[in-house]
């Protein structure tokens, strides 16, 4: 179980978010631009410190202002996938993938298993400049998984891809929670992405939670009660 109860003042915006999400499956944080999605995911990773509150993953307290606990970023064991793939251009795909490996610890996740899972076995000797956007994001996901995270955070991972590349990436993201037994928290403002990926949805609006539950309960409400503009 992921338990989040945080407040954070950012300029004139107050983020005041409280929700629980299951430890299994993909939880989508969904909302308009400016709703607070990235701020929340940054508080989960430790990149942004809440003013007050508590964040707990499977009984492991990551942040608790009352108890003065603030687990540093590198100890939270979060895998982070950004909008752009952020690979090292001068390194081969293989070196990029192995970059986050902890030395001296025998790995539980094997490179071959990751490359097979993500369909990137034939790309290992290429440089990132010679990959499609979708391939690049799969490498970024592989790199995060090889670091053996306790949870995976994805901030608009498909926003820079065209529709065909999005459709290509979706099945790979869907496989992650089951294969690795880790929760995935994914930010999007695109309804189709939420519909294709979410097991659980947290609706955000103006820094607050306006809905939280299984995707089949929440997604119909997005369609009718809180549509995003067609341009989004
Ligand atoms: N460092 C900051 N200083 C002041 N205001 C900030 C800061 N960071 C974020 N904000 C404001 O907080 C609000 C939430 O921002 P956030 O980036 O979390 O929203 P979002 O839902 O991820 O939006 P988007 O989909 O556009 O990325 C916005 O109004 C933003 O302008």
Image (cartoon, rainbow, N blue to C red):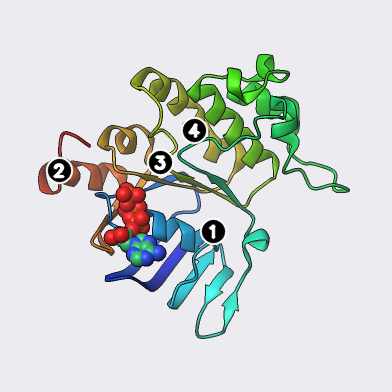
Please report whichever mark, 2 or 3, sits nearer to the chain's N-terminal start.
Answer: 3
Residue 97: percent from left, percent from top = 70, 33
Q: In the figure, is residue 51 to the left or right of 206?
A: right
Say few, some or many: other residues with alpha carbon within 10 Å of mark 3 (under 14 / 14 to 19 / 20 or more). Answer: many
For marks 2 and 1, give the CA distance: 29 Å
- Indicate which disc residue 227 carries: 2
Q: Is mark 3 within 8 Å of ligand 1?
A: yes
For marks 3 and 4, give the CA distance: 12 Å
Residue 140: percent from left, percent from top = 59, 35
Q: Secondary structure at mark 2?
A: loop
At 40% across and 71% down in the image, what residue appears?
A: 5
Mark 4 and mark 2 residues within 8 Å of each other at the beta carbon: no
Of residues 30 and 150, the one drawn nearer to the viewer in this rendering? 30
Say few, some or many: other residues with alpha carbon within 10 Å of mark 1 (under 14 / 14 to 19 / 20 or more). Answer: many
The residue where tag 1 is placed is 45
Q: In the figure, is residue 29 to the left or right of 99?
A: left
Residue at the far top in the pictured view: 122
Q: Secondary structure at mark 3?
A: loop
Q: Secondary structure at mark 1?
A: helix
The residue where tag 3 is placed is 156
Determine whether 6 is above or below 134 in the image. Answer: below
Determine whether 123 is above or below 171 in the image. Answer: above
Q: Nearer the viewer, mark 3 or mark 4?
A: 3
Mark 3 and mark 1 residues within 8 Å of each other at the beta carbon: no
Mark 3 and mark 4 residues within 8 Å of each other at the beta carbon: no
Residue 85: percent from left, percent from top = 53, 35
Please report whichever mark, 3 or 4, sits nearer to the chain's N-terminal start.
Answer: 3
- Indicate which disc residue 209 carries: none
The residue where tag 4 is placed is 173
């Amino acid at each position: 179980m992921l338990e989040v109860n945080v407040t954070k003042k950012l300029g004139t915006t107050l983020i005041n978010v409280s929700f629980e999400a299951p430890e299994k499956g993909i939880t989508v944080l969904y909302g308009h631009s400016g709703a607070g999605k990235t701020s929340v995911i940054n508080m989960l990773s430790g990149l942004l410190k809440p003013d007050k509150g508590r964040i707990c993953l499977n009984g492991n307290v990551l942040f608790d202002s009352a108890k003065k606990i603030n687990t540093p970023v590198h100890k939270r064991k979060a895998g982070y996938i950004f909008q752009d793939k952020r690979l090292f251009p001068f390194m081969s795909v293989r070196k990029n993938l192995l970059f986050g490996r902890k030395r001296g610890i025998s790995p539980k996740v094997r490179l071959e298993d990751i490359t097979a899972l993500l369909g990137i076995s034939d790309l290992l000797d290429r440089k990132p400049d010679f990959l499609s956007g979708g391939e690049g994001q799969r490498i970024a996901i592989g790199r995060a998984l090889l670091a053996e995270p306790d949870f995976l955070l994805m901030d608009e991972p498909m926003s820079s891809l065209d529709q065909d590349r999005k459709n290509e990436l979706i099945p790979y993201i869907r496989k992650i929670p089951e294969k690795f037994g880790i929760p995935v928290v994914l930010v999007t403002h695109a309804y189709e992405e939420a519909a294709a990926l979410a097991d659980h949805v947290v609706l955000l609006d103006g820094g607050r939670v306006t809905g939280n539950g299984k995707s089949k309960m929440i997604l119909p409400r997005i369609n009718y009660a809180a549509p995003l503009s067609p341009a989004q």
